[in-house]
Image (spheres, rainbow, N blue to C red):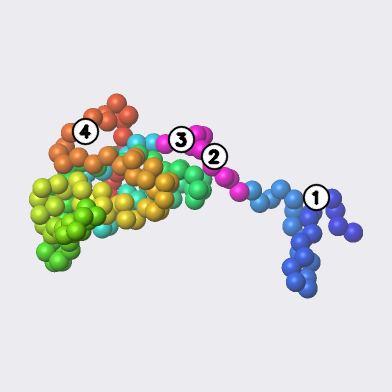
Amino acid sequence: MIPDSFSVFHSQDRVTQMPVGTIRTTVAKTGRVEQKWHHVDATDQVLGRLAVKIARVLMGKHKATYTPHVDTGDFVVVTRVGELKVTGNKLDDRVYARYSYYPGGYKETPMRVVFENRPERVLETAVRRMLPKSALGRRMLKKLKVYRGESHPHSAQQPIAWAF
């Protein structure tokens, strides 16, 4: 006789007993997720390794309540992006392409030129390519705030400093 507090699961040729209510899955709901603010100093950080850590926080994978279809991530403020490190020959080899959809409108810009003029764009592009390619990913990217210098206008949110 099976007690009332047990459920019976049939798995191919065997019967497995499991106590009712022992396994619970937490599913986050939109609007009920607490989002914190984090501050990252990008001085002497390697571009790709920093982008991976930022993307994980923007998606919310660092939380136990991570749900793939809900934006459970936190805000990230990155300062001193101009002092990032890029390893290897990526500054010369990697190019950023854009197309205006007009004949002859294809243009390529080397990473070195983009990094000298707008280092924020290099980090934003690296993080964007690691996020989901959907409306949810675009919403996650809006929580990334990147600044070239030391100051940022988000001190009222009291961002928590990251220590690597």
Label 2 belongs to which residue? 29
Q: Earlier in the sequence, mark 2 or mark 1?
A: 1
Answer with mark 4 or mark 1, whichever residue precedes in sequence.
Answer: 1
Q: Position of residue 148 (x, y in %)?
A: 16, 41
- Between the residue at mark 2 and the residue at mark 3, the CA separation in whole angstroms equals 11 Å
Q: Residue at x 46, y 46 (%)?
A: 63
Q: State if disc 4 and disc 3 touch (CB < 8 Å).
A: no
Residue 128, percent across and down?
31, 51
Q: Amino acid at mark 4?
A: His
> Which secondary structure lies at badge 2?
loop
Label 2 and label 4: CA atoms lie apart by 30 Å
Real-space CA distance between mark 2 and mark 1, rounded to the nearest whole angstrom: 29 Å
Q: Does the image show residue 145?
A: yes
CB-based contact (under 8 Å), mark 4 and mark 1: no
The image quadrant of residue 154 is: top left
Left or right relative to 135: residue 51: left
Closer to the eye: label 4 or 1: 4
Determine contact: label 2, label 3, CB under 8 Å. no
Characterize the local packing of mark 1: few (<14), some (14-19) or many (20 or more) Cα atoms within 10 angstroms: few
| Residue 164 percent location from the top left of the image | 28, 50
Q: In the rendered image, which residue does mark 3 sit on? A: 34
- Give residue 5's mark: 1
| Range of magenta residues | 25-35
Say whether disc 3 or disc 4 marks the residue closer to the N-terminus: 3
Instruction: State the image quarter where residue 38 is shown.
Output: top left
Q: Main secondary structure of the magenta part?
A: loop
